[in-house]
Image: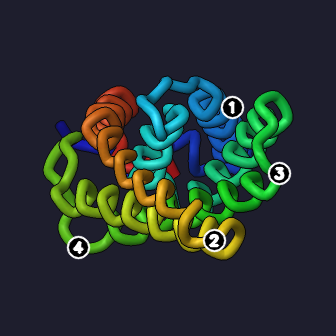
Amino acid sequence: MSLEEVPSWSKRASGRIGLIAVAIAVTTLANLIMVPMPKPLAEYDLSPVLIYALGVLMRPVDSMVVIAVAQGIGTTIKALNFGWPLVFIPGAMFVRGLEAPLIGLIARRGRRAQGAGIARREVVAMVVGVVWETVGFTAADVALFGPAMAAITLLTIVDAVFIPAAIPVVVAVRRALRARWLT
C-alpha cells in the first residue's frame, strides 16, 4: 500500500485545527476513562494509548498541544471530582505534554516502515516516552511530596502495557487515511 506523507485535508489550516480539536476531545475522554488497579495503585486512565499513537502520528508541536491541553482538561475534572491535589494539573500537562513530542522526534528519525506498518524505531520511541513519563512524574513527586511518597510513582512504568494497544491504533489510522502522518 502506497501512503501519502499527510492527508491533503490536514495541510490546510482548517483541517489541521479541526484534527487538533478532535484529538484533544478524544484524548480528554480517554483520560477520563479510568481502570481500577490493585492497591497500592489507584487507577489508570486510557490516555497513554493516544499519547503514544499521536506522538508517532502527529508533528511534535501538534502532539504537544493536543496532549498538554487534553491532560489539563482531564486532570482538572478528576482533581475537582476526586479531590486530587491541584498541582497534578500542571504536572500532567508538563510531563505528558512533553512525552508526545519526544516520541514524535524519535519516531520521525531514520528509515520509515514500509506500507502502513509501524517501524521498530516508533515502538522504541513509545518505550522512551514511558521512561520519560516515569522519571518526570517521580521527580515532580519527590520535589512536592518527598521521596517516600514519590516511590509509588515509579510504578508509572506500568503504562508500558498500553504500547501494544497503541501499535494497532497507529497502523489502523495509517491504513484508513492512507497516510504516514496525521500532520
Mark nearer the N terminus (1 vs 2): 1
The local crowd at label 1, few if under 14, some if 14 to 19, many if 20 or more residues have their Cα within 10 Å, is: some
Whole-number angstrom distance, CA of label 2 to CA of label 4: 40 Å
Mark nearer the N terminus (1 vs 3): 1
> Label 3's element?
loop
In the displayed structure, would residue 52 be above or below residue 135? above
Q: In x, y percent, where is residue 140?
A: 63, 69
Provide the residue designation for mark 2: 146
Q: Which residue does the image show at 17% across and 54% down from the upper left?
A: 113
Determine the image quadrant of residue 119.
bottom left
Provide the residue designation for mark 4: 110
Determine the image quadrant of residue 103.
bottom left
Mark nearer the N terminus (4 vs 1): 1
In the picture, measured across the screen, residue 113 lies left or right of residue 107, that is left
Q: Are marks 1 and 3 in contact (CB under 8 Å)?
A: no
Provide the residue designation for mark 1: 25
Between 146 and 175, the residue placed more toward the observer is 146
Tag in front: 2 or 3:
2
Q: Which residue does the image show at 37% across and 33% down from the upper left?
A: 173
The local crowd at label 4, few if under 14, some if 14 to 19, many if 20 or more residues have their Cα within 10 Å, is: few
> Label 4's element?
loop
In the picture, measured across the screen, residue 123 lies left or right of residue 142, that is left
Q: In x, y percent, where is residue 135?
A: 46, 69
Tag in front: 1 or 2:
2
Q: Which residue does the image show at 19% across and 42% down from the upper left?
A: 117
